[in-house]
Amino acid sequence: MTITQLKYALAIAEHKNFTKAAEHCFVTQPTLSTQIQKLEDELDIIIFDRGKKPIELTDVGRKIVFQARNIVNEADRIQDIVDQQKGFIGGEFRLGIIPTVMPTLLPMFLKNFIKKFPKVKLKIEELTTEEILARLSDGHLDAAIAATPLESDNIKERVLYYEPFVAYIPNNHRLRDMKTIEVRDLDIEDMLLLEDGHCFRDGVINLCKVFKNQVDENFQLESGSIETLIKLSDEGMGMTLLPYLHTLDVKEKMNSNLRHFTEPSPAREVSIIYHKSELKMQIINALHDVISGVIRGAIAFQNVEIISPKAK
């Protein structure tokens, strides 16, 4: 049994196809098939049911693949120890980012990070929190940026910043004449929300439920993007809430629609998260430091307060 054979098994389990798994591993299909056959012969079991389309794991195969993932991770840890000892920060790093953070935060830090750490090959995906947790669990992500806390025993969280909610209120809305608003002013019945699956949506709902016993049936309209919510709000469909960083891109003529909350302003916690057994901690630390520095710079430039973890 070899580490290479276990990596091939993991690739087949992921792609459910020998040809795609071989391409992923940069070997020919006969080479991969031969090694998997040798592994099954040595163990005297069948790992994959080749009669199914797509290929499926057998019952014992699922247990083998689960253990194989642990073994491969531990083997990779040896190289990680060497990299940390040498101070090397490089290699492939798979990062997931939730949709309500991706369009604002990524342009703020990506160029700086690439310039500072040119040997790191970032592979970035926009994913929901549910997708992120699943991919962290199965080893398909190294880390992610998401709203926290997530209360997962297998996930570690390092806070990057606390981002206030800002209200976007169109003309002729009942709150239009207020200079600042309070959470108790919110009414879910005239609120435009992101569609189900977005953690920012859940945060807005929780704010409204603090003062009102409202249920999902009251929702009038939901959308998949914050930009769409702003446009719908401008059409008089209702108000919405924005993460603070999104307001930096709001056109000047729309600034009159923004209303801040009275202190203490409700805010969401944004963190870099990773599996408790994650390797590559030197890259995670580098990402944390670069993003935190960029956020501090944005705070100083805009003369506003995005609460730092220490202040919280």
Image (cartoon, helix red, strand yellow):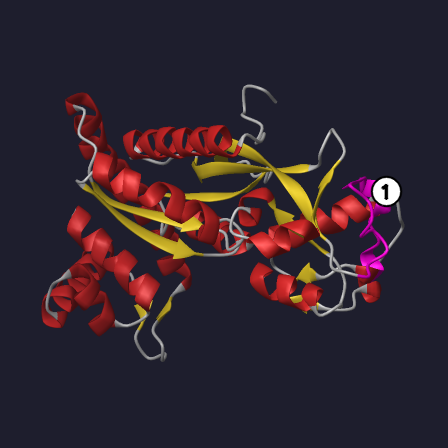
How crowded is the residue under tag 1: few (<14 C-alpha within 10 Å), some, or many (20+)? Answer: few
Residue 239 vertical position relative to residue 69 in the rendered view, above or below: below
What residue sits right under mark 1 in the picture?
A: 184
Q: Is residue 154 visible?
A: no
Q: Residue at x 56, y 39 (%)?
A: 152
Q: Residue at x 78, y 41 (%)?
A: 179
Numbered range of the magenta stretch: 172-189
Q: Is residue 187 magenta?
A: yes
Residue 28 vertical position relative to residue 132 in the rendered view, above or below: below
- Is residue 82 left or right of 139 when viewed as pictured? left
Q: Position of residue 117 (x, y in %)?
A: 22, 36
Q: Position of residue 49 (x, y in %)?
A: 33, 72
Q: Label 1: state its secondary structure.
A: helix
Q: Residue at x 42, y 62 (%)?
A: 59
Seen from the viewer's position, the closer of residues 244 and 136 is 244
The quadrant in which the C terminus is found is: top right
Q: Is residue 176 visible?
A: yes
Main SS, magenta residues: loop
Q: Position of residue 42 (x, y in %)?
A: 19, 55
Q: Position of residue 206 (x, y in %)?
A: 76, 46
Q: Residue at x 10, y 69 (%)?
A: 28
Seen from the viewer's position, the closer of residues 205 and 174 is 174
- Is residue 8 left or right of 59 when viewed as pictured? left
Q: In the displayed image of the protein, which residue is found farthest to the front?
A: 253
Dividing the picture into quarters, in which one does residue 34 lie?
bottom left
- Is residue 112 left or right of 248 when viewed as pictured? left
